[in-house]
Amino acid sequence: MKIRAYAKVNLALDVVRKREDGYHDLEMIMAPITLHDLIYIEKIDHGIQITANTNRMPTDQRNIMYKVAQLLIERYQIPYGVKIHIYKHIPTQAGLAGGSGDGAAVLKAMNQIFQLNLSLETLADIGKEVGADIPFCIYEKTALVKGIGEKLEFISKDFHCYVLLVKPKKGVSTKKSFGMLDLKNAEHPPIMDMKEAIENNDYQGVVKCLGNTLEEPSLKIVPDILKIKEEMKELGFDGALMSGSGSCVFGLTQDQELLEKGYQFFLNRYAFVRKTEILNKDSLKL
């Protein structure tokens, strides 16, 4: 069976507070994008086997796909194993939910292969035991996301926009970014205004509300993030922001020629450069 695992960007990310359990309460507007990993998965007699087109990710128990497969096999007493091969296109330590997307895709694929007939809601509940972004990746819909990522309120309106992704060579550890965060002096973007702008198909409103509390600490770890943002704005992109905890930066435009111009400008300057767009219902037909 073949399945796509879509990446995401955070159009707005607010770290609201630190909780007693050490986690942070977040409010975010997350949008899936058309960039995806391609996963082939099949039933085998026993065990979990993972292979990849890259040696940059572990293929053992540390891999998020291994963790969700093992969890599903144990919880539903599946008397078989799975063989997984992944063509990895989403970079790691980028803030694009590459790992979570893969985990969500494996859960959905195994649900079909083993005819478990689990709802998306149940799959999301299982997924959040392994990764906070997995519930969002199960649904692949633009959403207001709260808590540590488990509370989802979907935004039903499609939002059309071209997205240029540029990631410097160095990534950012999510744990390190949160650890360096100064919440008292941090930026808190207007999350509900962003939600309203998308619902009203107000592109300029979306651009105006772009913001990410984690950008400042991540900039200290990878200064190239700021340089990429500045270069995108100089080229004419309407807005530029770091996604998640970084280090990938995305630029927004409704001009396809500018998207191509930006792609050519950044292509040999940084480690990862991709043209993509916000994933909507009509995108899934591609």
Image (tube, rainbow, N blue to C red):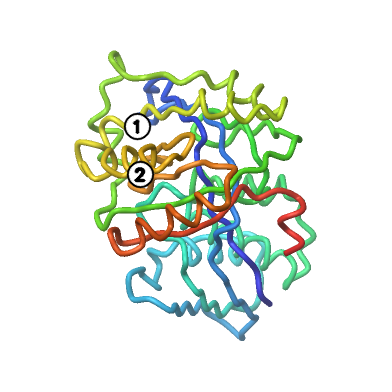
If you read the primary sequence from the N terminus, does the residue marked by circle 1 or circle 2 appear first?
1
Give x and y (percent) for residue 187. 36, 19
Disc 1 marks which amino acid? Leu
66 horizontally vs 186: left or right = right
Give 209 or 137, whichever is nearer the viewer: 209
Picture mark count: 2
Secondary element under disc 2, as helix, strand or loop, is: loop
Q: Which residue is mark 1?
A: 214
Q: Which mark is residue 246?
A: 2
Residue 230 figure quarter: top left
- Image quarter where the N terminus lies is bottom right
Q: Is residue 269 above or below residue 215?
A: below
Q: Is residue 280 above or below residue 186?
A: below
Give 75 or 154, whichever is nearer the viewer: 154
Give x and y (percent) for residue 216. 28, 30
Residue at the (32%, 70%) spot, across then down? 56
Residue at the (52%, 78%) spot, across then down? 85
197 horizontally vs 58: left or right = right
Residue at the (61%, 84%) spot, across then down? 44
275 horizontally vs 142: left or right = left
Give x and y (percent) for residue 245. 36, 40
Disc 2 marks which amino acid? Gly
Give 81 or 11, whichever is nearer the viewer: 11
Q: CA distance from mark 1 to mark 2?
A: 8 Å
Give x and y (percent) for residue 71. 55, 60
Give 223 or 136, whichever is nearer the viewer: 223
- Image quarter where the C terminus lies is bottom right
